[in-house]
Image: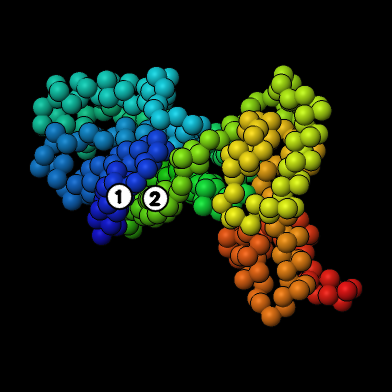
Amino acid sequence: MIFTIGIFTSLFFFILLLNKKNKSLPDRILSYWMLMVGIHLASTYIYTKGYWELYPHLIGITAPFPLFYGPLLYLYVVYSVKDSHRLSKKDFFHFLPIVVSYLYMSRFYFFYSAKEKRLVDKGEIDDFGTFGNILVVAIIISAISYAIYSYRLLNRHRRLIEDNFSNVERITLNWLKSFIWGVGLIFLTAALILISRDILGIEYSFNPEFIFYSMIVFSILCLGYFGIRHQNIFTDNKVLEIRDETKATYKNSGLKEDLAHIKHKALVGLMEEQKPYLEPNLNLNTMADKLDLPLHHLSQIINQFEGQNFNDFVNKYRVEEFIERAAKDKQFSFLALALDSGFNSKSTFNSVFKKHKGVTPSKYMANYTSKA
């Protein structure tokens, strides 16, 4: 049952992602990932049902497939923080271990008889025993290594969206951080099962690999659901990408100091008079157009004069707008006032308010009212 759910779910998400409107490169990467998982689970399901004995030429055909998972996770994250519509040539080197594995196993696939393949599968011929152990270790190392590096890249993504957008709830990849922790747990579980069974000789009354595959199926449900909902930040947006240099220095930016002061004054005037922050989806691109500035110059001005990124700068005004409205319009709920102030959800409002004021909205307004 668990394999059936996993197979149909992964293929279902694969089809949904292929038909998603405004598909981005990360969407396509995720769709291929879902397809790989579906094929891998289908092969494992066939094995558990004993079909490898009937059709021995299927034996080991997807053995290197788990080596896809780490690189696909990494590339999904990379192109979520990078504006590109196609993979670069060097990206394909991440799949080199898979190619090497299949080349090594090619003699098994093409030159072993059906009988010999059955004997290899049962361990009676040990031609690929060492290779199998190396492959398992490589899969675990690959998954954990790519997960760690992908997690580090997600911090870059967070900085990227906070420098460009005032509403980050639908475009964050925080869910992917949780997924990466799950990947680590899955392969740690696999390592513990292998050590306990093959090295310590512990015998289980059930097939412990079902624990591993059950975790994979659950992760597919989460990955597919959030992956389909995820909005790519580069779709229909010009985005200021994070550079490696220290942003505080802004060397060679081309923005003269006197112009920076003038534009900063214009920015503050715009925020106070026109209140663009009341638009929940306000972004750096829109503000740069209003001020007739390049994206990187506006980001520089906000960082140098306000000491904040774009997200914090805009939400500071929204918080003050809420406080002003809440003091006057006491007949409305906090949520209604927050939405009118430019916030797009209760959870975002509460977290942003506490970040800026250090306390919850209700506690702050209680103290504010008593002082007034």
Q: Upstream in the sequence, badge 2 or badge 1?
A: 1
Looking at the image, residue 329 lies above or below residue 103:
below
Q: How is the image coloured?
A: rainbow
Q: x, y (%) of residue 79?
A: 47, 33
Of the residues shown, which amino acid type is indicated by label 2? Ile
Foreground residue among 307 and 268: 268
Q: What residue does disc 1 label?
A: 16
Q: How many marks?
A: 2
In which quarter of the view is residue 91 placed?
top left
Residue in view at x 33 percent, y 21 percent: 100
Residue in view at x 32 percent, y 38 percent: 32
**Residue 312: assigned label:** none
Question: Quadrant location of the N terminus?
Answer: bottom left
In space, the residues marked 2 and 1 are separated at their CA atoms by: 8 Å
Q: Is residue 211 visible?
A: no
Residue in view at x 68 percent, y 52 percent: 274
Q: What residue does disc 2 label?
A: 228
Looking at the image, residue 205 lies above or below residue 286:
below
| 307 lies left or right of 93 | right
Q: x, y (%) of residue 198?
A: 39, 41
Q: Residues within 10 Å of mark 1 (few under 14, many from 20)?
A: some
For mark 1, give the secondary structure. Answer: helix
Q: Are marks 2 and 1 in contact (CB under 8 Å)?
A: yes
Foreground residue among 101 and 320: 320
Question: Quadrant location of the C terminus?
Answer: bottom right
In which quarter of the view is residue 322 placed?
bottom right
Q: Is residue 60 visible?
A: yes
Looking at the image, residue 218 lies above or below residue 156:
below
Foreground residue among 109 and 313: 313
Residue in view at x 22 percent, y 29 percent: 125
Q: x, y (%) of residue 257?
A: 81, 26
